[in-house]
Image: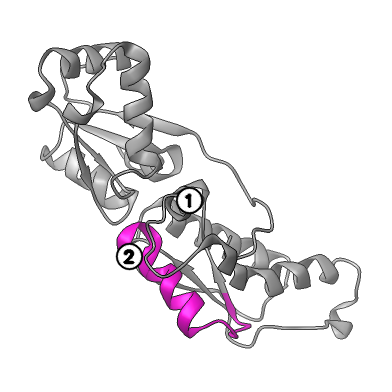
């Protein structure tokens, strides 16, 4: 999580040892920024944290979720660091993908030193999936098809090129013996939800992301 989560997260730790009437800090208009479009992992993170804070009565009312897509999380990062650094009502969803992009220098003008990492509130499993109507049934079959004809498979993901969704495919391909991973066609979308939608529409042949991004679609058939 980004630096702006710090005050709220630290306050939460304090709440467990104090009575409701002695809160050191209480957000007046709590908000969580999900650096992607609705339906993705960051969106899920904000909504899950919001429900937990409500259930524990740590915030008044509900947590407003604001989707701020763009730049693989870079737009939201710049907004928080440059414009809302003193906003005590704000928390921001982040992940290993954020750390990766920062390490790559992918957020121009911003650095990893501008944030403080507190810890994780959850973990997710990475997946590579195809449509239920696909003739491909296993990961080896998908990778074999990519190896034979890279142009026949387009993979969609919710992270920018070079981000974790992209890296999942590249790592799997490399392990499978595909030496020229640059031949793999990857299309970036502003969130896993958008990427899954493209898979279901038949625009792409495979999806790379996390279980939380695809679960709702799987459950609905």
**Location of residue 75 with respect to 214 vertically, above or below:** below
Q: Earlier in the sequence, mark 2 or mark 1?
A: 2
Q: What's the image's color scheme?
A: one colour
Task: Decide: few, some or many residues near mark 1? Use Cα within 10 Å; few <14, some 14-19, many ≥20.
Answer: few
Is residue 219 visible to the viewer in this orientation of the structure? no
Quarter of the rendering occupied by the N terminus: bottom right
Structural distance between the alpha carbons of marks 2 and 1: 20 Å
82 part of magenta stretch: yes
Quick check: 191 left or right of 52?
left
182 part of magenta stretch: no
Identified at 66% across, 81% down, the residue is 60
Report the magenta residues as a range: 70-90
Mark number, residue 103: 1
User: Which secondary structure is most common in the magenta stretch?
Assistant: helix
Q: Position of residue 145 (x, y in %)?
A: 16, 15
Identified at 30% across, 50% down, the residue is 160
Q: Quadrant of residue 198?
A: top left
Q: Residue furthest bottom?
A: 28
Residue at the disc numbered 2: 69
Is residue 216 visible to the viewer in this orientation of the structure? yes
**Location of residue 209 with respect to 135 vertically, above or below:** below
Identified at 56% across, 81% down, the residue is 85
Q: Position of residue 69 (x, y in %)?
A: 32, 65
Q: Quadrant of residue 7?
A: bottom right
Q: Quadrant of residue 105?
A: bottom left
Task: Decide: few, some or many residues near mark 2? Use Cα within 10 Å; few <14, some 14-19, many ≥20.
Answer: some
Mark number, residue 8: none
Q: Position of residue 28 (x, y in %)?
A: 63, 88
């Amino acid at each position: 999580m980004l630096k702006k989560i710090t005050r709220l997260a630290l306050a939460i730790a304090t709440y467990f040892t104090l009575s409701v009437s002695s809160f050191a800090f209480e957000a007046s208009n709590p908000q969580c920024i999900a650096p992607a479009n609705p339906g993705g992992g960051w969106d899920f993170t904000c909504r899950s944290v919001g429900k937990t804070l409500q259930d524990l009565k740590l915030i008044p009312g509900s947590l407003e979720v604001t989707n701020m897509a763009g730049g693989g999380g870079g737009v939201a990062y710049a907004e928080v660091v440059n414009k809302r650094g003193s906003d005590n009502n704000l928390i921001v969803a982040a992940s290993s993908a954020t750390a990766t992009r920062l390490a790559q220098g992918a957020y121009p003008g911003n650095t990893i030193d501008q944030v403080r990492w507190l810890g994780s509130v959850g973990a997710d499993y990475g997946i590579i999936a195809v449509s239920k109507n696909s003739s491909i049934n296993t990961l080896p079959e998908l990778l074999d098809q990519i190896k034979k004809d890279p142009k026949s498979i387009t993979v969609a993901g919710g992270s920018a090129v070079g981000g974790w969704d992209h890296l999942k495919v590249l790592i799997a391909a490399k392990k499978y013996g595909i030496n020229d991973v640059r031949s793999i066609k990857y299309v970036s979308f502003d969130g896993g939800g958008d990427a899954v939608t493209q898979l279901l529409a038949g625009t792409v042949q495979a999806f790379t992301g996390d279980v939380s991004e695809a679960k709702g679609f799987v459950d609905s058939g």
